[in-house]
Image (cartoon, rainbow, N blue to C red):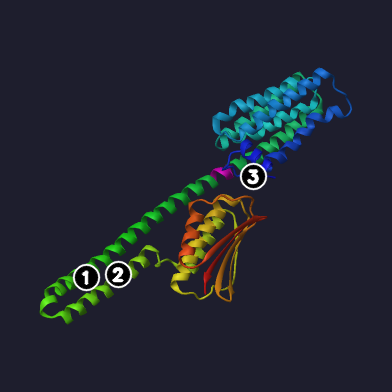
């Protein structure tokens, strides 16, 4: 299976949203071979067929790496294959159908519609001059036009999804900047006052060291207490304890998933948790939902909570493409945050991906 995934990564771009469907569309290529069910080809024709299929596959899969005007050479190559085989093989009209599907991605609606019309029109011109058989031009006209229209809709959806992902990335970056500014303000507010108190107490202890050792010792102990309190406050600020909580994070996830056409199902009620545990699980939920939107190509996502004897468990399950997952900075961040709080993370992939996070009860 890993061999097929490696080939898949070579044939299609890694960020492609089409998944494995390009291989499904190759079933239309059977039109080209229909002739050979009742006519046995000669040796030369077999060689030409093999060369044609090789050229077609290069043009077909290479087209998934391109968009806009860069697709024109691929479309022209497919049209040329359909025209060259037209006199001897009525199934060659399938190359015009593939060309119409590619033409849907050359640009916005109007440009794509013109490109599809040119492809279908050139196919009909070839039919009129080289292959007038209805077996050639009827599929070209009907299926080519239908595939082109569907392709326009699909291309427009992909553009809108790309714009949505871009806006989400921008919102995420703005949120990160705002969070850094918040932590900076919190640290300034916390440390500015606390360090002033520590300085005053340390100066007072130094002056009292010879005159009143007992009071000096008390001031030094006060410095220790203030510094410990400041350390706890700094850790709280850096850890981002002042988050919107699980309820707010879950509502944010619902809106983001809906924008990505993913249906969210959740437990009817959220558990009551300590602030530290809730903040850590909210961070895990946010990162897990982000991965569902960006990588899974899922249609459904479920968020659930369960209680174990010594832990509370957050589970995020999607029905996306699953498979092997690469642990980037987000997953590494989840693991480190959970580990620091005594929790752990488990990620499993099969039919979809399941993320489970344990936190001490």
Answer with left or right where residue 193 lies relative to residue 134. Answer: left
Residue 324: x %, y % from top left: 62, 50
Mark 2 falls on what kind of element? helix
The residue positioned 70% from the left and 39% from the top of the image is 23
The residue positioned 51% from the left and 50% from the top of the image is 328
Looking at the image, the residue that sits furthest to the left is: 211
Query: On the image, numbered disc 3 is attached to which residue?
Result: 19
Count of labels in the image = 3
Q: Is residue 131 visible?
A: no
Q: Give the mark nearer the N terminus: 1 vs 3.
A: 3
The residue positioned 68% from the left and 41% from the top of the image is 3
Looking at the image, the residue that sits furthest to the right is: 38
Q: Residues within 10 Å of mark 2 (few under 14, many from 20)?
A: some
Quarter of the view holding residue 310: bottom right
Quarter of the view holding residue 43: top right
Q: Is residue 159 visible?
A: yes
Please state the extent of the stretch shown in magenta in the rendering: 156-160
Disc 1 + disc 3, Cβ < 8 Å:
no
Residue 159 magenta-drawn? yes
Disc 1 + disc 2, Cβ < 8 Å:
yes
Q: Nearer the viewer, residue 304 or 234?
A: 234
Helix, strand or loop for the magenta stretch, by majority:
helix
Query: On the image, numbered disc 2 is attached to which residue?
Result: 230
Residue 141: x %, y % from top left: 73, 32
The residue positioned 71% from the left and 29% from the top of the image is 95
Query: On the image, numbered disc 1 is attached to which residue?
Result: 198
């Amino acid at each position: 299976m890993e061999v097929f995934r490696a080939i898949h990564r070579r044939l299609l771009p890694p960020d492609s949203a089409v998944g494995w469907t390009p291989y499904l569309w190759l079933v239309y290529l059977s039109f080209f071979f229909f002739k050979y069910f009742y006519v046995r080809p000669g040796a030369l024709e077999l060689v030409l067929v093999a060369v044609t299929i090789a050229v077609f596959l290069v043009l077909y899969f290479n087209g998934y790496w391109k968009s806009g005007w860069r697709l024109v050479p691929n479309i022209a190559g497919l049209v040329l294959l359909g025209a060259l085989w037209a006199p001897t093989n009525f199934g060659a009209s399938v190359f015009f159908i593939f060309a119409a599907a590619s033409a849907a991605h050359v640009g916005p609606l109007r440009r794509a519609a013109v490109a599809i019309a040119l492809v279908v029109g050139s196919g009909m011109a070839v039919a009129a001059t080289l292959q007038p058989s209805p077996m050639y031009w009827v599929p070209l006209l009907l299926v080519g036009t239908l595939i082109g229209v569907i392709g326009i809709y699909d291309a427009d959806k992909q553009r809108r999804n790309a714009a949505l992902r871009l806006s989400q990335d921008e919102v995420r970056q703005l949120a990160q900047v705002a969070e850094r500014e918040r932590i900076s303000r919190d640290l300034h507010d916390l440390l500015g006052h606390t360090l002033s108190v520590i300085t005053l107490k340390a100066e007072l202890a130094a002056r009292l060291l010879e005159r009143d050792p007992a009071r000096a010792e008390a001031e030094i102990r006060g410095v220790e207490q203030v510094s410990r309190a400041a350390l706890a406050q700094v850790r709280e600020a850096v850890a981002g304890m002042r988050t919107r909580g699980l309820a707010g994070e879950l509502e944010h996830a619902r809106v983001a998933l809906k924008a990505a056409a993913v249906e969210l199902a959740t437990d009817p009620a959220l558990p009551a948790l300590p602030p530290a545990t809730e903040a850590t699980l909210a961070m895990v939920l946010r990162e897990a939902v982000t991965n569902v939107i960006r990588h899974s190509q899922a249609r459904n996502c479920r968020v659930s909570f369960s209680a174990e004897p010594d832990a509370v468990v957050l589970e995020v399950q999607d029905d996306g493409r699953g498979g092997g997952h690469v642990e980037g900075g987000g997953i590494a961040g989840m693991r480190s945050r959970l580990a620091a709080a005594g929790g752990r993370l488990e990620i499993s992939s099969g039919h979809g991906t399941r993320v489970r996070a344990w936190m001490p009860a």
